[in-house]
Image: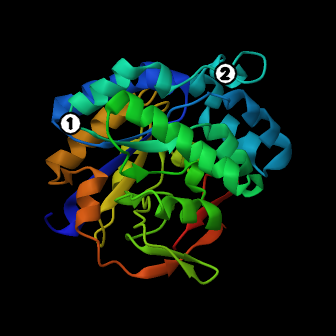
Amino acid sequence: MQSKSNIISLKIDVDTYQGMEKGVPVLLEILRKYDIKATFFLSFGPDNSGKAIWNIFRKKDFLSKMLRTGAPRMYGLKTMLYGTLLPAPIIAASMPRTVDSVGKDGHEIGVHAWDHRLWQDNLGKLSVGRIKEEFGKSFDAFRSILGAEPKATAAPAWLCNLTSLKIQDSLNLEYSSDTRGRLPFYPRINGDEFKTLQIPTNQPCIEELIGLDLIDSNNLVEHQISYLREDAPNIITVHAEVEGNIYKDEFDQFLKKTISMGYEYTPLNVVADHFHDSPIRDINYESIPGRSGLVASSI
């Protein structure tokens, strides 16, 4: 890996059925155009996105965020009804050909979730057995489709806890990406230390930027570039439902511009190989500008 300041890694999260069915093929096409290899984290189980409606009553600023980012247009009506008025379709586990196409293009594939919505809204309430079950189902689906063991995980909504980290430590992973922060680290919670390397997202997501400080599609790429770090590999979380949908042109522009500026792209497993000697850092829970709720962070 060259100097840390010119490295960008794309952590592509697939949260929904629409993101898997429509967003992933769009992203693959754009990445082929620039010969970029990324890391895809897939949700394998049911798309219960419609259950997010209850966050209007549970999470401060959730509704304002949905309106500010144009979520109805971004995710579509069906997605916003899945798991409530419409049955919850199975995401990656029902689309093995799409999963296989990601691997055939040379991208790294990891596990994002089984039930993304369940984890995001209820992690703190889930029993040890239920968290193990969530990992087990997604790992089984991964093995069934790809014929290999998952080597990386990325928790939905950057949420992890003592239980989830303990379970991850038993899964022989190369790394996880469950947090926000600056540089890779080994996590510690309440004095308990863990052996699975964390590679935190250290760049804002599109949906955290749009609508804030007069940022719109016209100046989005300019603002994204202004956030790039000179003191760390730049880890950017991309969402198949966002950059693979209404912001695909801006995503293309960002890649083209950063390549012209001398940035190089590499998947997260390459970053992990260079940070085995990372320090131990405490995980805290804090708010991120442009998001509702708290995220796990090493900042």
Up/down of 122 relative to 80, above or below: below
**Residue 177 location in percent, x, y?**
44, 57
Q: Which residue is drawn at 62% across and 37% down?
A: 115
Secondary structure at numbered mark 2: loop
Q: Is residue 288 visible?
A: no
Left or right: residue 53 versus residue 18 is right
- Indicate the quadrant where residue 97 lies: top left
Identify whether 77 is placed above or below 16.
above
Mark 2–mark 1 distance (CA, rounded to whole Å): 30 Å
- Amino acid identity at mark 1: Gly
Whole-percent x, y for residue 295 in the image: 61, 60
Residue position for label 1? 106
Q: Are marks 2 and 1 in contact (CB under 8 Å)?
A: no
**What colouring style does the render use?**
rainbow
Q: Where is residue 113 in the image (x, y as percent from the top left)?
A: 54, 41
Q: Quadrant of residue 29?
A: top left
Position of residue 251 measured from the top left corner of the image (x, y, whole percent): 35, 36
Please name the residue that numbered disc 2 is placed on: 88
Q: Which residue is drawn at 65% across and 46% down?
A: 119
Quadrant occupied by the N terminus = bottom left
Disc 2 or 1, which lies upstream in sequence? Answer: 2
- What is the secondary structure assignment of the residue under circle 1? loop
Q: What residue type is labelled 2?
A: Ala
Q: Which one is nearer the viewer's eye here, 268 or 104?
A: 104
- Closest to the observer, 65 or 192: 192
Give whichever of 252, 163 is nearer the camera.
163
